[in-house]
Structure formats: structure tokens, C-alpha cells
Image: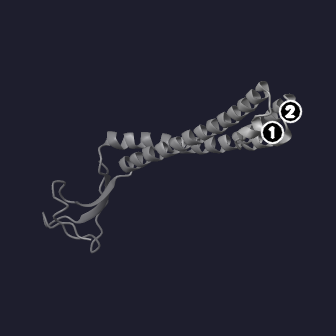
């Protein structure tokens, strides 16, 4: 228990319970020591988790744009090797679906190459979307953990305590 500072005459109100002591302001945790420790244990990793999630989000965005650019070049090269017309290659590379009437004059291996390229491009987009979603989940979950930790760690109450007797009820004699 922390020592009580001496009362200042005229500034601290008189205790109404015992009539002898002065009431001084004291701040103490509302929760027990273990709960405050758990709050601190939740607070620190949640801050680190939010930083990690933000870093993952930035790196995911940078990496996915780099991968999509190199993936587009690779798709263009593979389709050009199959002697597929440039308008179809442009549509596949831009992510647009190729109409069936444009695929009709192509041979079976050419059509298979177009479908493979479309599948590869959509898989890249899904993978990038999942990575962004996971990053956001980490950020939100860490934020919620931080709120719980903050509520437990910083739950303090200010009350007035009698300087003469420790068993005086400070709530009965509290004045502001």
C-alpha cells in the first residue's frame, strides 16, 4: 500500500465519517493485480499485431502488383507461343472473359492455353485477395485484443481516502 501524502489544510475536505481526518485523492486500479497484469499482457502483443498486420498489408499490396505484372508478361509469352491472335491475348491479360465466338476458330490446344491463362490470372487475384483479407483480420483481431487489454490495464478509479483512519468509508465523506 502506498503511503498517504500529508493533507493540506483548507484544501482537503474533512472526513464526514470520523470527523477527524482530511480526505485526500488517491488513484487505484479497479481490478485486481492479476487482471491488470493480464491487461498489460494483452495490450503489448496487440499493438505489435496491429503493426505486423499493417506491414503485411503493405507488403501484400506491393508483392501482388509485382506478381500481377510479371504474371501478365508470362501469360502473354505463353499465349504468343501458341500462336493465339493478339486481341485475345489482350483480353486475357486484362482479365476480361473471352467471348465464345472468338474461341471458335482456335484449335483445341489454343483454347486450352487460353483457359489455363484465364485460370492462372484469376488464381493470382484470389490469392492476393485472401492475403489482404488475412492482413485485415490480423489488424482487427489485434485491435479488439488491444481494447480488452486497455480496459483491464487502465481501469483506474479516483477516490478520496481519510488520512486518520483506514476503515473510514471514503464514499460517505467524498466531496469534490
Return the x and y of residue 17 as percentages of the image width and height.
13, 64
Residue that numbered label 1 is attached to: 89
Residue drawn at the location 84% of the way across and 28% of the way down? 82
Q: Earlier in the sequence, mark 1 or mark 2?
A: 2
Depicted 96 relative to depicted 24: above or below:
above
Residue that numbered label 2 is attached to: 80
Nearest the eye: 75 or 165: 75
Depicted 148 relative to depicted 74: above or below:
below
Depicted 4 relative to depicted 95: above or below:
below
Nearest the eye: 18 or 94: 94
What is the distance, in whole Å, between disc 1 and disc 2 at their CAs?
8 Å
* Colour convention: one colour
Numbered disc 2: secondary structure: helix
Residue drawn at the location 42% of the way across and 49% of the way down? 147
Neighbour class for label 1 at 10 Å: few (<14), some, many (≥20)?
Answer: many
Circles 1 and 2: CB atoms closer than 8 Å:
yes
In this view, the residue farthest toward the top is: 109
Amino acid at each position: 500500500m502506498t503511503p498517504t501524502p500529508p493533507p493540506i489544510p483548507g484544501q482537503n475536505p474533512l472526513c464526514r465519517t470520523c470527523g477527524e481526518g482530511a480526505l485526500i485523492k488517491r488513484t487505484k486500479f479497479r481490478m485486481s493485480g492479476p487482471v491488470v497484469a493480464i491487461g498489460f499482457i494483452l495490450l503489448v502483443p496487440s499493438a505489435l499485431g496491429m503493426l505486423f498486420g499493417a506491414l503485411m498489408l503493405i507488403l501484400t499490396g506491393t508483392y501482388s502488383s509485382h506478381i500481377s505484372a510479371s504474371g501478365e508478361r508470362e501469360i502473354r509469352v505463353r499465349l504468343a507461343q501458341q500462336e493465339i491472335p493478339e486481341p485475345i491475348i489482350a483480353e486475357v491479360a486484362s482479365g476480361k472473359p473471352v467471348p465464345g465466338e472468338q474461341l471458335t476458330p482456335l484449335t483445341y490446344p489454343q483454347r486450352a492455353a487460353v483457359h489455363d491463362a484465364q485460370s492462372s490470372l484469376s488464381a493470382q487475384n484470389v490469392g492476393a485477395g485472401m492475403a489482404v483479407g488475412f492482413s485485415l483480420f490480423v489488424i482487427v483481431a489485434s485491435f479488439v485484443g488491444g481494447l480488452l487489454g486497455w480496459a483491464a490495464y487502465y481501469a483506474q478509479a479516483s477516490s478520496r481516502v481519510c488520512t486518520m483512519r483506514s476503515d473510514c468509508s471514503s464514499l460517505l465523506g467524498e466531496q469534490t
